[in-house]
Amino acid sequence: MPEGDEDIIGKLRADGVEFVDLQIVDIKGRHHHVTLPSYSLSSDSFTDGLPKLDGSSVKGFKEIYESDMVLLPDPSTYAILPWAKEEKYKTARMFAFVLEDSGRKNFPRDSRYIAKKAESYLKEQGYDTSYWGSELEFFVFDRVKWNTNLKQREASAFYKIYSHELEGPISYAVRPKEGYYPTEPHDSSSALRSEVGVIAKKNFGIDVEAHHHEVAGGGQSEIDIKYNTLLKQADNIITLKYIIKNVAANNGKVATFMPKPLFGDNGSGLHVHTSFWNEGSNTFYDENDAYAELSQTGRYFIGGLKEHSRSLTAIVAPTTNSYKRLVAGFEAPIFIAWSRGNRSANIRIPIYFKSKPGAKRIEFRTPDPSCNPYLAFSAIMLAGLEGIKKKIDPGDPVDENIYKLSPERKKELRIQELPHSLEEAADALRSDNAYLKPLFENDLIDWIIESEISEHRAVESRPTPHEFYLYFDL
């Protein structure tokens, strides 16, 4: 893929591209696009941008009286889309940065721009780069139906998930919490994930390290992609979700990144692995550390994550559904603690191998796939950097199953819990956001808080089918 704009016009012509998709991501992490004929692009398009965005129609961007915005294509994200049915519709994708309507000023709520700033800010703090690895979990269902009447007086609401894995008998049903690594035919999505992997590599240059069925039934899957730098890896996650949705649709299925679509089974996470590097050395690695070969810098990074874990949930677990995942009994990280190899803590130091500096990283297990990865990575980076700057002691690691500890033992170990609702997370962000200020402007933080409180109250105020079960005959 081209890295600059000097040869992109020639690349479009050489590849026979008829249309160009300019793609952006809103604050919530939703993916948007506008399609242009390739002949309408010129070299000026990559310096001046294209006046193609009504910012008032993108949630959280602009008011109606200030809506004109500009899209600046990013040639490094050029990729041929594989969905076109005919050659005459051949389309290339490029992500775009969002600019204000005057002065070519970057829009401060453009999450890709925030991620780009995060990489520059990290260099200012004395690190050459950071690497980010991702484990993306999701569900593939046969189909889903739902209805919610959003009129003032709502009289009906339901959802129905159709999945052979849940119901049989066309294929084998997967029992709750017993879906980890089954072979076909129990694993009904294996071929679909392989198709995703081929497209990810061939069309978008994304290296898939592995894919497998996850713990839950209903086609829960995981795809792990190779680590990359912050902005590129966030692009890769959005792109991978895009591929998964399209491949599922083309196979008559539907994919969802809701953290918890099924009651009584595991939810989906987006486990994030990171390390900071300087002059070719991993600053999180220390061969002399007997516990986990983790440096003092790495420990301070963990101290920052622990310090801000509650407010971080508003950014890395940003939906009401996120907190249906973050409950006890389903391997979700509800406790703020760190450890090596301990999946009951929300911060983990993988120790698959020893004496491998390049593999040393810190895993943050709180995020889920409903988050905006540009904002999530940037916020995680800022929390860790503050831990390093202020030398925040993370305390002792916890090498016990936290789920089974008594309240007294958890108190003794000073183990806190993550928020139990989106409103609680938003309140935590309201009281703890100073560490985000280098990259997140005040009005963006305020918008996130108010939006999440509004969503929490909209869900909380509506009766559910389970409430009818519990209370209708009282």
Image (tube, rainbow, N blue to C red):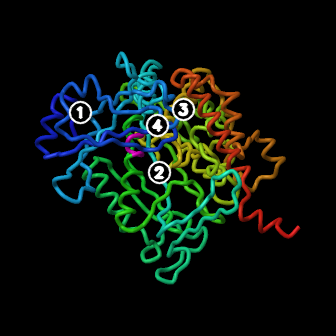
| Residue 346 appears in view | yes
Residues at discs 2 and 3 in contact (Cβ within 8 Å)? no
SS state under label 1:
loop
- Residue highlighted by disc 4: 57
Name the amino acid type tagged 3: Ala
Q: Residue at x 24, y 28 (%)?
A: 45
- Residue highlighted by disc 3: 379
Magenta stretch: residue 261 in it?
A: no
Q: Where is residue 52 in the image (x, y as percent from the top left)?
A: 33, 33
Q: Give the mark, 2 or 3, whose residue is nearer the N terminus.
A: 2
SS state under label 4:
helix
Name the amino acid type tagged 1: Glu
Q: Give the mark, 1 or 4, whose residue is nearer the N terminus.
A: 1
- Residue highlighted by disc 1: 3
- Residue highlighted by disc 2: 135
SS state under label 3:
helix
Q: Give the mark, 2 or 4, whose residue is nearer the N terminus.
A: 4
Name the amino acid type tagged 4: Ser
First to last magenta residue range: 234-238
Q: Position of residue 218 (x, y in %)?
A: 53, 68
Name the amino acid type tagged 2: Glu
Q: Give the mark, 1 or 3, whose residue is nearer the N terminus.
A: 1
- Label 2 environment density (alpha carbons within 10 Å; few <14, some 14–19, many ≥20): many
